[in-house]
Image (spheres, rainbow, N blue to C red):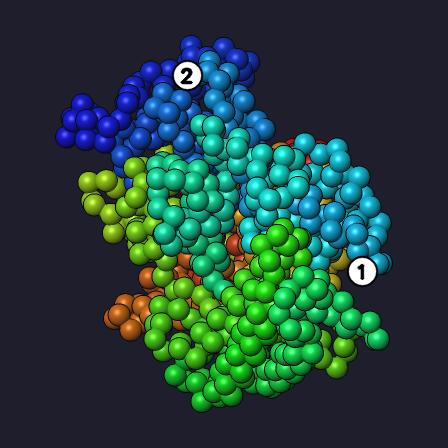
């Protein structure tokens, strides 16, 4: 189909000339004139052309762009020019706050200069990230309920009078989630046009900005909230959570399935339930308080506070019985999924969940009776709107409880329970609580019907989308393969960085296999030797907290004696840990899951990455296990169709932490020799860039690392 025919079919105002856009980032273009150290990147130019073509031809893409390609400008320039030229909004969705802020604060302003046009870009967050001035005022009027948080509350009150955005990210001091949940913006608690603070509302202000924006920068979670609202009836032509749009760019697209799975999961636990119930009715010693008493005073219905008290006690007793039975069922395990094997043991839990759900609905029913007796004149009271929000949460929890009883009717959902440790162990005899969760096993059909079908074009890009030179896994898991074949386009844009010269990939052959009891001791000794060889400057990636802790305890005194600071995930806030690691050129960071991706430490602070084990998901993870069973039932191999591909993506992310700019050099040492001894190891290695490679004794690797990094140490 010609470009002209496409233009008429999709009523496009103006298609983009990809060669003209490419000139912006080519030799002699505006970017080259603005940057003293400009170097033309062929892969970036090709990526930009392909994205431009995807806009023109309404394509769905999977574009893998290696580190250093410069994918942000490659998608920003076409997105911005398309949006302005055709008066269409383009959504750019990312997986991390850091990338959102980088795009909003640095990349978009520079892109405007490159193209010589003003483009309105708005960074949007979920409304829970903004302060609600009405709720803040209500909480300030009940200061006696926040005795332990008065200092934080006073600081937030002062800040609220100065802030221009009302965004939580501006707050630099600590405060509890409990306090923030009482003062942040919530859709059900929003009074809309009735609110006395509507002229100053930060959420309304940012929404008004979004209505006239060309580019909307969001995270995956907020985008899925909008997609869900549209799928449930809001449609695609009007504002839902976000203003209407027809084009999406997913950056960090390797995380789409995880983000969608997380968003569409539902969880309930005693803290979630009791937090909301306590807002309505709470009793402390001889005093009772809560919104219910305000509502009852406004209502024309008979006094139901005694019924409320009895209903609250029944819910609390049901929660207690459920937790006792669940902890007894779990015993020494931390997770258990509901399936045919566990159903007999789960049956008492299912019954108790039904009982809890019914008691919650009964409680909500009494509250609604009281609310129905309130005249419209008094429905503007804050207590009325707060209660609407509370009831939504409690009724949602009740439905989540009841859903466990119909688990067999939903084969593509896994129902599971998890034992979690209390952050403050006030009860030494029972330091755990239980979370009850339902999780979708396959988001591909939802992605197709909710995203790919209604959108004109969807750009998926990341540094890690392929498995052994094929996109099949990504296309299948994210639902792209349901789209019309002619709309789908895949391509690879290789990193311009000299991995073959600057990076050593080493695997020791004299360390036992991970299942061997001597593996942990060998890891401890190898990590110590490698840190000494690199003079610190090392990120050590583990697959379990227990292994990380064991190595940390085994070598910390030796590391400290060397004058090297040893940092460990969990000992400080994630962002503070990263800042300390970046600032200290000799420090070492031990980390697990979340540090395998999304961290950027260029330069001398990171010259060695140690990957302790191949990052296979543990077999007893309920969601992973259920997905494996689903694949096996369909006649597939869960190991080759899910376990290996997921592990390779994460492995590639971990490998990618080392080289963040063209001058970076160093070593990636993998202490898991399955990489070289198992047939599937080849799939991992072939998914990496070409590097120098060693498969030999650990001492020879240590010597090579020392030699490679010697000049940097000096």
Decide: few, some or many residues near mark 1? Use Cα within 10 Å; few <14, some 14-19, many ≥20: few
688 vs 321, nearest the viewer? 321
Q: Nearer the viewer, residue 590 or 563?
A: 590
Badge 1 marks a residue whose secondary structure is: helix
Q: For mark 1, what is the residue?
A: 145
Residue 355 to residue 385: above or below:
below
Q: Mark 2 or mark 1, which is nearer the start of the sequence?
A: 2
Quadrant for the N terminus in the image: top left
Residue 413, image x, y percentages: 39, 69
Q: Find numbered disc 2 in the image and state the secondary structure of the residue it sits on.
A: loop
Left or right: 699 with respect to 644? right
Please report the residue visible at 78 percent of the width from the left and 43 percent of the height from the top.
157
Res 432 visible: no
Residue at the image point whose x is 63% and y is 44% from the top: 195
Residue 37, image x, y percentages: 54, 17
Tell me the residue at 40%/22% (across/down).
Answer: 84
Q: Which residue is mark 2?
A: 24
Q: Quadrant of the C terminus?
A: top right
At 44% from the left and 27% from the top, the residue drawn is: 214
| Disc 2 packing (10 Å; few <14; some 14–19; many ≥20) | many
Q: Which quadrant holds residue 302?
A: bottom right
Between residue 611 and residue 424, name the one nearer to us. Answer: 424
User: Which quadrant of the figure has residue 172?
Assistant: top right
In this rendering, position of residue 313 left or right of residue 78: right
Can you see residue 646? yes
């Amino acid at each position: 189909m010609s470009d002209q025919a496409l233009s008429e079919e999709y009523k496009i105002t103006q298609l983009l000339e990809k060669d003209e856009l490419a000139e912006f980032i080519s030799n002699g273009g505006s970017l080259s004139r603005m940057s003293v150290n400009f170097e033309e990147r062929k892969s970036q130019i090709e990526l930009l052309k392909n994205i431009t073509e995807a806009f023109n031809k309404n394509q769905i893409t999977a574009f893998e762009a290696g580190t250093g390609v410069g994918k942000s400008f490659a998608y920003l320039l076409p997105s911005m020019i398309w949006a302005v030229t055709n008066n269409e909004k383009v959504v750019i969705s990312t997986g991390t706050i850091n990338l959102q802020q980088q795009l909003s604060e640095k990349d978009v302003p520079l892109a405007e200069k490159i193209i010589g046009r003003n483009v309105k870009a708005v960074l949007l967050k979920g409304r829970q990230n903004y302060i609600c001035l009405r709720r803040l005022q209500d909480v300030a009027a009940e200061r006696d309920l926040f005795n332990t948080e008065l200092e934080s509350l006073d600081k937030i009150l002062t800040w609220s009078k100065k802030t221009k955005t009302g965004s939580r990210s501006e707050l630099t001091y600590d405060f509890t989630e409990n306090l923030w949940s009482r003062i942040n913006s919530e859709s059900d608690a929003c009074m809309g046009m009735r609110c006395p603070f509507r002229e100053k509302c930060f959420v309304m202000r940012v929404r008004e900005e979004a209505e006239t924006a060309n580019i909307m920068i969001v995270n995956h979670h907020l985008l899925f909230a909008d997609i869900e609202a549209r799928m449930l009836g809001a449609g695609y032509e009007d504002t839902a959570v976000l203003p209407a749009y027809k084009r999406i760019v997913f950056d960090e697209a390797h995380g789409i399935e995880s983000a969608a799975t997380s968003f569409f999961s539902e969880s309930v636990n005693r803290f979630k339930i009791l937090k909301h119930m306590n807002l309505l009715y709470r009793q402390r010693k001889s005093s009772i308080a809560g919104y219910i008493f305000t509502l009852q005073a406004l209502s024309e219905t008979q006094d139901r506070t005694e019924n409320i008290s009895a209903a609250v006690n029944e819910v609390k007793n049901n929660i207690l019985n459920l937790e006792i039975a669940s902890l007894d069922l779990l015993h020494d395990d931390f997770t258990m999924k509901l399936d045919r094997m566990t159903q007999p043991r789960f049956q008492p839990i299912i019954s108790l969940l039904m009982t809890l759900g019914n008691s919650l609905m009964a409680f909500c029913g009494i509250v609604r009776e009281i609310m129905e007796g309130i005249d419209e004149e008094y429905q503007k009271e804050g207590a009325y709107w707060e209660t609407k929000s509370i009831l939504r949460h409690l009724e949602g929890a009740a439905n989540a409880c009841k859903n466990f009883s119909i688990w067999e009717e939903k084969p593509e959902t896994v129902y599971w329970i998890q034992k979690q440790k209390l952050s403050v162990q006030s009860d030494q005899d029972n330091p755990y609580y239980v979370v009850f969760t339902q999780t979708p096993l396959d988001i591909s059909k939802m992605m197709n019907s909710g995203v790919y079908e209604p959108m004109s074009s969807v750009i998926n890009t990341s540094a890690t989308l392929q498995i052994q030179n094929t996109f099949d896994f990504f296309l299948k898991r994210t639902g792209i393969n349901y789209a019309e074949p002619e709309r789908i386009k895949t391509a690879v844009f290789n990193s311009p960085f000299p991995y073959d010269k600057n990076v050593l990939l080493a695997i020791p052959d004299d360390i036992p296999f991970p299942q061997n009891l001597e593996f942990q001791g060998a890891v401890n000794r190898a990590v110590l030797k490698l840190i000494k060889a690199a003079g610190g400057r090392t990120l050590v990636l583990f697959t379990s907290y227990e292994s990380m802790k064991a190595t940390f305890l085994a070598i910390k005194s030796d590391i400290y004696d060397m004058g090297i600071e040893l940092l460990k995930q969990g000992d400080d806030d994630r962002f503070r840990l990263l800042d300390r690691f970046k600032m200290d050129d000799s420090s070492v960071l031990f980390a697990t899951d979340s540090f395998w991706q999304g961290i950027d430490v260029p330069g001398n602070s990171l010259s060695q990455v140690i990957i302790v084990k191949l990052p296979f998901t543990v077999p007893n993870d309920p969601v992973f296990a259920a997905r494996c069973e689903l694949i096996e039932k369909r006649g597939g191999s869960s190991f080759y169709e899910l376990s290996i591909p997921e592990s390779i993506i994460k492995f590639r992310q971990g490998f990618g932490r080392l080289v963040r700019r063209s001058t970076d050099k160093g070593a990636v040492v993998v202490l898991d020799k399955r990489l070289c001894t198992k047939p599937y190891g080849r799939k991992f290695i072939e998914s990496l860039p070409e590097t120098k490679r060693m498969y030999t004794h650990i001492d020879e690797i240590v010597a090579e690392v020392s030699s490679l990094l010697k000049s940097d140490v000096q």
